[in-house]
Structures are given as structure tokens and as C-alpha cells.
Amino acid sequence: MSLAHLQPSLDAPRVIEVTGLSFSYNGETVLKDVEFTVARNDFVAVVGPNGGGKSTLIKLLVGLLAPQKGQVRVLGQSPAKARHRLGYLPQHPSLDRAFPITVGEVVLMGRLGLGGRFWGGRWSRADRRVAREALRTVGLEGLAGRSFAALSGGQRQRVLLARALATQPEILLLDEPFAGVDPAAEEGIYEILDRLRRDLTVLVVSHDLGFVSPLVGHVICVNRTVATHPTAELTPELIRQMYGREVRLVRHDHKGPPGGCACE
Amino acid sequence: MSDFWQALASYAFMQNALLAGLLASLACGVVGTFVVARRISYLAGAIAHSVLAGLGAARYLQVVNGWQWADPLGGALVAGVLAALIMGLVSLKAREREDTIIGAIWAVGMALGILFMAATPGYGTDLMGYLFGNILMVSPGDLWAMAALDLVVLAVGLGLYRGLGAVCFDEEFARVRGLNVELYFLLLLVLTALTVVLLATVVGIVMVIALLTLPAAIAGRLAGRLWQIMGLAVVISAVFTTAGLGLSYGPDLPAGAFIIVLAGAVYILASLWGWLRGRGRA
């Protein structure tokens, strides 16, 4: 079985370009001299040990954090300028679960900031159509009127994915989209991502790579530094081996060698 | 109650009081809903208490310096907005020390107000009115000022409903969508300050926080969307102020305190009912 069809061509435009990026929290280096690029329509898995800097990297890509050294270019712009073209699903959403809001309204939040529409109460028909489609994509079209607080963890995660999709992004960045999600719902989310990857560039931060492997074009290992592995250059046996080790590594919560990559 | 209807028909001050309650309810429902949803009641409480500094300073300037333009309501507005901005910036910049600083502004604002009033001849009655409300003393001029405040609060609160709601629900996502989260947060606090000043006329600054949050909290048990809660909270608040005014008139009790006790009692009953219903389902 060849995986070459998953590999974007070498001259595909780079939608993410990171050069010489370093970032530290309170003097502790989280990311050091990070360099990588992501091609349009690639499907990238971001892996690495806990505390290795995966979430920090994603936050830098969406412009929630600013690089202390180096440069991040997203869609040829600074993240702050490009962020209305990004769909972001945070690992620990800062949202208030008990907030009085319906599922449909949560998804509509994804339409914020498009064309500068922050004012007014009623959403346009076009916005509502996009939100409805996003909800259908994640298989929850029947729940639009339901209270967000009443959902299960898996449903909530899918609603937040729909919110990210409603932004009609060019790049989808999902930080641990399977946290607190039961296996059936996780499979559902993967099926959704499989359908989306034709039109989008997708970055998924995930621990469990056993299932994601057939979709992935590249694996980015983050552990203070970053190494990119093109999966197409590897045989299926090697991929299995690599993922197998990665899954084991994560389950036992091993720390990779300092500055090294957990899945090398 | 029949005394109340008679008084309402024959006395202008009763009509003014009723109107003041209804005007306050409009802003209360809208801003109270944001305050409860964003969980910043404590910030609102500090804003309310620091308003006393402005009231006291304006009264002092009026009486001692003879500056007639130093209207207590204007002083309250200046102090409230100032406190809102200071606390908003503190909350945004120094989260870990937020509660200490809120507590400090809460008490210092009040202390300043009391000092100003002590230095003002004949402060006693004023102080009681500011602290616990003097809805029966509302003048037509006050009503106009309240209506103007209402207009500002409703126009901004409803006009920016979407952005304010987004910032209250999920700050980080709103930021990624390009919203100026800090600006919206400060705006919400300024709206809270204006509403606090409005409500203080009715129930006084000590009890404002209950009237601001309880109608929205009760409405939150009945409705699932922000705008529905706002509408309901306006109605509930109007019922509380009107009923409190009516019920306190006969026995000659302070209306402000009566309104708060009424709101508190209904809130506790609603919570109890919700809890019992939850148990029945389980």
C-alpha cells in the first residue's frame, strides 16, 4: 500500500512557516529554535510528551502567544492578521460550561469577526446557514436548540469542532480534540476530519496515534525542539512501529531525551 | 396594598418612585444578565461601594464649596466609572491579586465617601439615603437622568450584544476571532458602573448587588438563552421593585430593603425548587 497520495506535492504552497522560534514561560524554555513548514492540504499530527510544548506551539500559531524569538508566518501573514482564517479548538476551552447558551448559538460564535460583524443581535441568514452546515458535518444537526450545558463531553467537543468549522477556516488547528471523549465519539471526529482534509490543512495535537495514522501526511514531534517526519517516506511497518512506540511512550508518560523527540 | 394604590393615584412622589423602579429594571435586566453570566458580581459589588466616594465628594463640594453643579449623581457616575476602569485593568493585568485589590477598592471607596460626608454639614440623612436607598425621594430631574442612563446602557449593551456575549462565554475564542477582548471587558464594567448608579437610587449602594444579580439569576433558571434571560430579568426586576414599593408602603418600612428581601426570598425559593426537581429526576 502506497501512502504517496497523502503526501502534498513538494511545491504545494506552505501555509505555515516557522523559523528560529523560541518561547519560554517564566524563564523556562518551552520551545527552542523550532523550524518547520506545513504545506497546503496536509494533515499533520503534532505529538510529543506532556509539557513538551505542543499546546504552546498551537497557541503561537493562532496568535494567542507572541514568539519571543524567531518568526511565525501563517498563510503568509502574522498569526494575529491571519487568525480569522483559522479554525481553532483549544485543549482546555476557557469557556464556562454552565453558560446560558444553546448549541446553535455556540456554533454561530464561529461567525464572529467575519466582516467585522460584532454588533447587533441577529445573525444573517448566510451565517445561520454556515452554522447549520457545520453542525450537520459533526452529526449534531438535531441539537441546535439544546442547551450547551446539558451535553455530554463528546457532544460538547463535537459542537466546539463545529464552531471551529463555522469559521470556514483554511487551516484547522485542533488541540487534543479527543480529551474526555469516549471512543465512539472519537471515531466520529476522525471520520469528520477524514472528509474535511480534502479542502483544508489540518493540524491535530493528539496522544493516540494508532487510529490517526491512515490520515496523517506528516508527524511533527514536539519536545522543546521540533522534528518533522514525512510519513510517505516510511514503510507501513515503520509507521506502525513508530506509532506503536509513541502510544506506549505516552501511556507510560515517559519523558523524551531533553531536546530530543519522543517518537524518533 | 390598598393604601399604596391610593397613594399612587394621589401623590407624585409615589408615581416617581414607581417609575424609578421600572427605569432601573431595564438596565438591571440587561447588564445583570451579563454580570451573572460572566461571574463578576464581586467586581460589581466593589464598583457599587466605591460609588459612595463620588457621592460624598460631590455633596461636599456642593455644600461646603457651594459648587451647585457638583451633582451627587454625577459624582457617583465619575466614581463608578473610575472604579470600573481601575478594577478592570487590575483584573486583566494581575489576576492572581485580583480579589485583594477588589476588596481594597471596595472598602477604600466607602471610607472616602464616609469621610467626605462627615466633613459635610448635615450629612446624616444623606448618608442613609445613599447607603440604603431613598426611592420615595426621587425627583423628576432624577428620573430624566435615569432615563438617559438607561438609554446609554441599553443602546451599548444590546448593540454590542454579540461581542459582549462572546467575550463572556469564551474569552480565548473571542480573541482568536479578532475581538478586542480587553476593551469589551472594560466596556462591560463601565456598563455595570452606570447600572449600579441607576439601581443605587432605588435600593442604595449597599444592596445594589442583590438587585443587579438576583433577577438575572432567577431568570437563568427559567430560560436557556442570554437574550431570553435578559427579557425575563427585566420583568422580574420590575415586579420586585413594584411589589416591594407597594408592600412596604402600608407598614411604612424602607422600600429598598423590602425589595431586596423579596428578591432574596424568591431566589432562595427558586433555587430550592430547582434542587427538589433535580432530586425528583435522579
Image (tube, coloured by chain):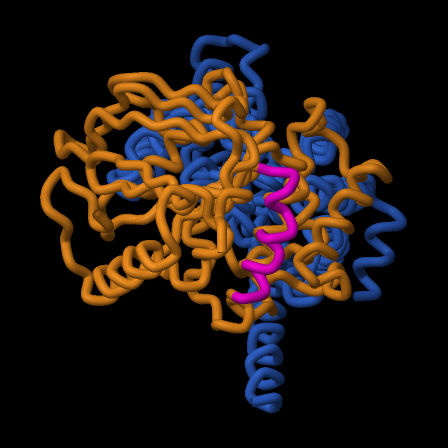
Outermost residue on the left side: it is: A258
Q: Residue at x 68, y 31 (%)?
A: B160
Residue at figure coordinates x 74%, y 46% from the top left: A131
Asked if residue B149 can be seen in this view, the reply is no
- Is residue A209 something that shows in the picture? yes
| Residue ID at (58%, 83%) | B278
Quarter of image, res B163: top right
Q: Is residue A188 magenta?
A: yes
Q: Nearer the viewer, residue A59 or A124?
A: A59
The residue stretch that appears in magenta: A187-200
- Measuring from the top left, give residue A50's x and y in whole percent: 24, 52
Residue A79 versus residue A8 in the image, above or below:
above
Residue B71's quadrant in the figure?
top right
Q: Is residue A70 magenta?
A: no
Magenta-drawn stretch, dominant element (helix, strand or loop):
helix
Q: Quadrant of residue A219?
A: top left
From the top left corner, tell me how far across and down residue A68 is, in percent: 26, 20
Q: Could you tell me residue A65's position as x and y percent?
A: 36, 29
Left/right of residue B66 with respect to residue B273 in the rendered view: left
Tint applied to chain B in the drawing: blue
Q: Residue at x 66, y 63 (%)?
A: A147
Q: How many marks?
A: 0
The chain whose colour is orange is A
Q: Is residue A10 above or below residue B265?
A: above
In this rendering, position of residue B103 left or right of residue B230: left
State the residue lying farthest toward the right: B9
**x, y percent for residue A145:** 75, 61
